[in-house]
Image: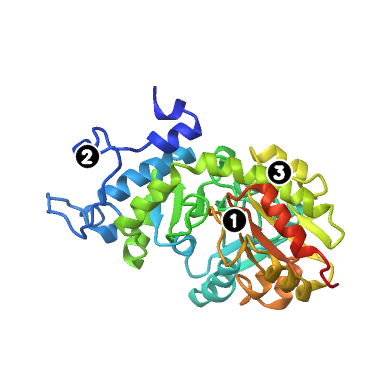
């Protein structure tokens, strides 16, 4: 049976693994070497060298990532931002124009609005939830449409099917950051997205012990990104490749548990009098709940919420909570909390944060693998007698 016929859980274990296994080792060994014997390669990018992302650890990992993503090819990078920035630079040149949704991850938004203009690359941010308005952003130099599967941290869900149709109608290359909806929840290539990006630091690895990024797509498109990555130097080292490959094998079981817990926790928060609003696409109150239900196999492990009392109440709640750790990042086995306006979006202009719906008091919760009942009990005590 071919890898393509297997379920996601089976692909995560077996896809891409070397056949026969290296020295009969069940687990792929770490090739902790930077360079390899020359064998007559005629192209610089084919020379075996760790910076060129083609060690045995890279090759096996690329095969597994491509298989679980429904893509021809995959490429790992040193971080999610390395994947994002390298891919955008590989597609855009001086005079080109990028269209992107208006609620981007803070690092991406800063790169698009502050860094790309220095290369003569222009951009327009469009309303995430209003595809009908996107045509107003088109220019003769428009080349790329950039969206996110779920926005960070407000968990809006763009109409991704219409986004692809819009891009095809106007000959735009489609990029989607699917970090919040990894394989097992969502397959963007199945909708027709050209390139899919992930911060593998998050769900794909799942253990908060490495930084990595992923780009998947056709062999031709990924090869172009790889050439840029080879020169920019954002390679993932072999040991991190090993850790990511190992972490990915538990993705299906981790996601299932995180999604189930997140639904229970979001329901609890929505019903609590100290909570003013909950952002979770699995709730029927979410404005894009039906849209999300038609796109994803489950609703993810991310919840954002606001308390009566704003930033002061949020900080007090986070101090009182004992199980979720106060830290950036997400998608790991430990539940993590952060106030984005004071963390991952602190460098975004306050006016842009307000426009994106990121209030000073918004709390982002990444649900880990703690028991949902224990998390709810802990959050209940943190909310008890909370001033507002």
Q: Earlier in the sequence, mark 3 or mark 1?
A: 1
Disc 3 target residue: 292
Disc on the earlier residue, 2 or 3: 2
Residue lying farthest top? 1
Let me know if residue 261 appears in the view: yes
Dot placed on the residue nearer the N-terminal end, 1 or 2: 2
In the rendered image, residue 255, in percent from the top left (x then y), is placed at: 57, 43
> Callout 1: helix, strand or loop?
strand
Residue 220 visible in image:
no
Is the residue under label 2 in contact with that under label 1 (CB below 8 Å)? no
Residue 195 lies left or right of residue 60; in this view the side is right
Taking the spot 22% from the left edge, 39% from the top edge, the residue there is 22
* Between 203 and 86, the one nearer to me in the picture: 203
Q: Position of residue 357 (x, y in %)?
A: 76, 66
Q: Are marks 3 and 1 in contact (CB under 8 Å)?
A: no
The residue located at (48%, 60%) in the rendering is 80
Nearest the camera: 52 or 155? 155
Which callout, 3 or 1, points to the residue nearer the camera? 3
Q: Quadrant of the N terminus?
A: top left
- Return the residue nearer the eye: 65 or 159: 65
Q: Quadrant of residue 316?
A: bottom right
Quarter of the picture containing the C terminus is bottom right
Give the image location of residue 215, x and y in percent: 45, 52
Q: Gap between marks 2 and 3, in whole Å?
A: 42 Å
According to the picture, the residue beneath numbered tag 2 turns out to be 22
Name the disc covering residue 83, or none: none
How far apart marks 3 and 1 lie (CA) works out to 20 Å
Relative to 28, does residue 135 appear above or below in the rendering? below
* The label number, if any, that marks residue 145 in the structure image: 1
Nearer to us of marks 1 and 2 is 2
Circle 3 packing at 10 Å, graded few (<14), some (14-19), many (20+), is many
Tell me: 336 left or right of 220.
Answer: right
């Amino acid at each position: 049976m071919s890898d393509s016929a297997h379920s996601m859980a089976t692909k995560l274990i077996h896809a891409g693994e070397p056949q026969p296994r290296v020295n009969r080792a069940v687990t792929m060994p770490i090739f902790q070497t930077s360079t390899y014997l020359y064998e007559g390669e005629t192209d610089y990018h084919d020379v075996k060298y760790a910076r060129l992302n083609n060690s045995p650890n890279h090759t096996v990992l690329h095969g597994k990532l491509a298989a679980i993503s429904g893509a021809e090819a995959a490429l790992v990078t040193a971080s999610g931002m390395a994947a994002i920035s390298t891919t955008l630079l590989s597609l855009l040149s001086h005079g080109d124009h990028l269209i992107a949704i208006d609620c981007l991850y803070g690092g991406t938004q800063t790169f698009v609005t502050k860094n790309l203009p220095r290369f003569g690359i222009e951009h327009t941010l469009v309303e995430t939830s209003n595809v009908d308005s996107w045509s107003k952003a088109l220019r003769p130099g428009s080349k790329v449409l950039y969206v996110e599967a779920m926005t960070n941290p407000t968990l809006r869900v763009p109409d991704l099917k219409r986004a692809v149709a819009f891009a095809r109608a106007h000959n735009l290359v489609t990029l989607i950051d699917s970090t919040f909806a990894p394989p097992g929840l969502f397959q963007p290539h199945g909708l027709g997205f050209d390139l899919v990006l992930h911060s593998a630091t998050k769900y794909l690895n799942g253990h908060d012990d490495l930084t990595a990024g992923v780009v998947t797509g056709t062999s031709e498109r990924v090869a172009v990104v790889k050439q840029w990555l080879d020169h920019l130097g954002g390679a993932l080292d072999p040991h991190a490749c090993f850790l990511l490959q190992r972490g990915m094998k538990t993705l299906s079981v981790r996601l299932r548990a995180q999604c189930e817990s997140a639904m229970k926790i979001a329901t609890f928060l929505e019903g609590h009098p100290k909570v003013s609003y909950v952002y979770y696409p699995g709730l029927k109150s979410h404005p894009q709940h039906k849209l999300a239900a038609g796109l994803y196999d489950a609703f993810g492990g991310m919840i954002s919420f606001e308390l009566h009392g704003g930033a002061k109440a949020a900080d007090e709640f986070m101090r009182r909570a004992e199980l979720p750790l106060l830290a950036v990042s997400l998608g790991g086995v430990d539940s993590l909390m952060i106030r984005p306006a004071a963390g991952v979006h602190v460098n975004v202009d306050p006016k842009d944060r307000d426009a994106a719906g990121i209030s000073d008091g918004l709390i982002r919760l990444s649900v880990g693998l703690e028991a949902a009942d224990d998390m709810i009990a802990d959050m209940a005590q943190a909310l008890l007698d909370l001033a507002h």
